[in-house]
Image (cartoon, rainbow, N blue to C red):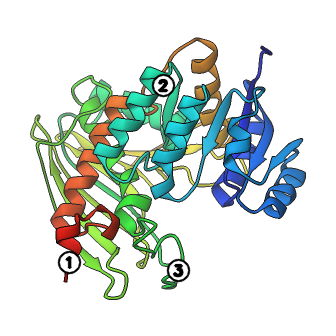
């Protein structure tokens, strides 16, 4: 076994390309293989990203004995199947968010990783960026006093295309699963940091959403959460509506604002910026958080170091198994509040006319 973790990519979409580029700059990993159900796509992707092995079937990549870890970026409903199959093949796993369509499905995936003694992490790449660690530190240090309200927004406007992943009911489309999980996860991170813990789970979740009349997925949605320590969160997301993205945290002694909390730039390192306005101050103070790489490079190294250390889970603020399950339970509750159950989740009785 070499020093660097040898990776294989399952699926060759835009997010896989971003991870491949991040992996190339990592200290711990290297790209060995890619797989797509379209062999020509795998060949083209492999040539572009420098992957020497290219497969036209996911099964063939999992059968490659030289691959140690896989990055899974199929559409959401495929995450469970391929994570479980990768675990059964003895591969360590980084799976794109959401880890699963719902929490019950995620529990089966985590159990598979546990039984087969492999690493598994949900790929919220922003959790690996130095800006996120700095945010949690500021909250723990009480720089804004007692946290009272969190506001988190991640939303964009895309043209409605019923067959596309983000609008397709059969592919678990909509805002809550695509970008809403970011807002939920950062609110849970902040609420936990306020108590000196990695995360906190809400005691109640509510919300409203605008479901598309043709496919029934949430075009945009607003959620509310109340945490055990009394902190309140308002989260908003969308795939059909542009909003002002960012995170604001309001405390008894001031407030924090992150204009780019999820570090979305994929092609270059981008420092974090956190603005602090203390009570009584005339103007906010800008705190720049240096970053030597993209979030995807940090993410690859979080996984690589954990794998080489023999750990099965990541270390906070990256997503642990308990953190992932709590996040999906909150997303499940948010979807329930807006009335979104995917057709494939419904029982035969519910689907009957």
Nearer to us of marks 3 and 2 is 3
Residue at point 46%, 67% (across, down)? 171
Q: On the image, numbered disc 1 is attached to which residue? A: 352
Q: Name the residue nearer the viewer: 331 or 66.
A: 66
Q: Quadrant of the N terminus?
A: top right
The image position of residue 90, as x and y in percent, is: 60, 25
Query: Is 3 placed above or below 78 here?
Result: above
The image position of residue 113, as x and y in percent, is: 46, 27
The image position of residue 236, as x and y in percent, is: 31, 64
Q: Earlier in the sequence, mark 1 or mark 2?
A: 2
Q: On the image, numbered disc 3 is attached to which residue? A: 163
Q: Secondary structure at mark 3?
A: loop
Residue at point 52%, 84% (across, down)? 161
In the image: residue 184, left or right of residue 53: left
* In contact (CB < 8 Å): disc 1 and disc 2: no
Marks 3 and 2, Cα distance to the nearest angstrom? Answer: 35 Å
Q: On the image, numbered disc 2 is attached to which residue? A: 314
Nearer to us of marks 1 and 3 is 1
Residue 288 visible in image: no
Q: Residue furthest bottom?
A: 213
Q: Name the residue nearer the viewer: 36 or 228.
A: 36
Q: Quadrant of the C terminus?
A: bottom left
The image position of residue 295, as x and y in percent, is: 61, 42
Q: Secondary structure at mark 2?
A: loop
Marks 1 and 3, Cα distance to the nearest angstrom? Answer: 24 Å
Q: Earlier in the sequence, mark 3 or mark 2?
A: 3
Q: Name the residue nearer the viewer: 120 or 15.
A: 120
Query: Is 187 placed above or below 40 here?
Result: above
Quadrant location of residue 294? Answer: top right
Residue 153 visible in image: yes
Marks 1 and 2, Cα distance to the nearest angstrom? Answer: 43 Å
Q: Name the residue nearer the viewer: 243 or 158.
A: 158
């Amino acid at each position: 076994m070499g020093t660097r973790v040898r990776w294989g990519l399952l699926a060759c979409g835009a997010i896989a390309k971003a991870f491949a580029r991040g992996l190339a700059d990592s200290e711990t990993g290297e790209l060995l293989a890619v797989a797509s159900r379209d062999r020509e796509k795998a060949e083209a992707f492999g040539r572009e990203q420098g992957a020497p092995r290219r497969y036209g079937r996911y099964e063939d990549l999992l059968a490659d004995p030289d691959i140690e870890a896989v990055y899974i970026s199929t559409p959401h409903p495929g995450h469970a199947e391929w994570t479980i199959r990768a675990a059964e093949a003895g591969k360590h796993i980084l799976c794109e968010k959401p880890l699963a369509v719902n929490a019950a499905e995620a529990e089966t995936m985590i159990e598979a990783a546990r039984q087969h003694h492999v690493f598994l992490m949900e790929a919220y790449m922003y959790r690996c960026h130095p800006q996120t660690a700095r945010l949690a530190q500021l909250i723990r240090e009480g720089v804004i006093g007692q946290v009272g309200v969190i506001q988190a927004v991640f939303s964009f406007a895309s043209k409605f295309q019923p067959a596309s992943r983000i609008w397709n009911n059969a592919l678990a489309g909509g805002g809550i699963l695509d970008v809403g999980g970011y807002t939920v996860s950062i609110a849970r991170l902040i609420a936990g940091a306020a108590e000196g813990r990695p995360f906190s789970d809400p005691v109640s979740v509510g919300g409203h959403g605008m479901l598309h009349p043709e496919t029934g997925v949430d075009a945009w949605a607003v959620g509310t959460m109340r945490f055990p320590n009394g902190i309140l969160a308002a989260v908003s997301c969308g795939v059909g509506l542009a909003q002002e993205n960012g995170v604001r945290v309001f405390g008894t002694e001031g407030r924090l604002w992150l204009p780019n909390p999820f570090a979305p730039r994929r092609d270059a390192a981008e420092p974090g910026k956190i603005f602090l306005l203390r009570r009584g101050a005339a103007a906010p103070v800008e705190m720049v958080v240096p970053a030597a790489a993209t979030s995807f490079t940090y993410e690859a190294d979080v996984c690589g170091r954990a794998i080489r250390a023999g750990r099965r889970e990541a270390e906070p603020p990256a997503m642990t198994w308990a953190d992932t399950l709590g996040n999906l339970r909150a997303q499940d509750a948010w979807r329930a509040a807006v009335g979104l159950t995917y057709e494939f989740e419904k029982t035969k009785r519910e689907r009957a006319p």
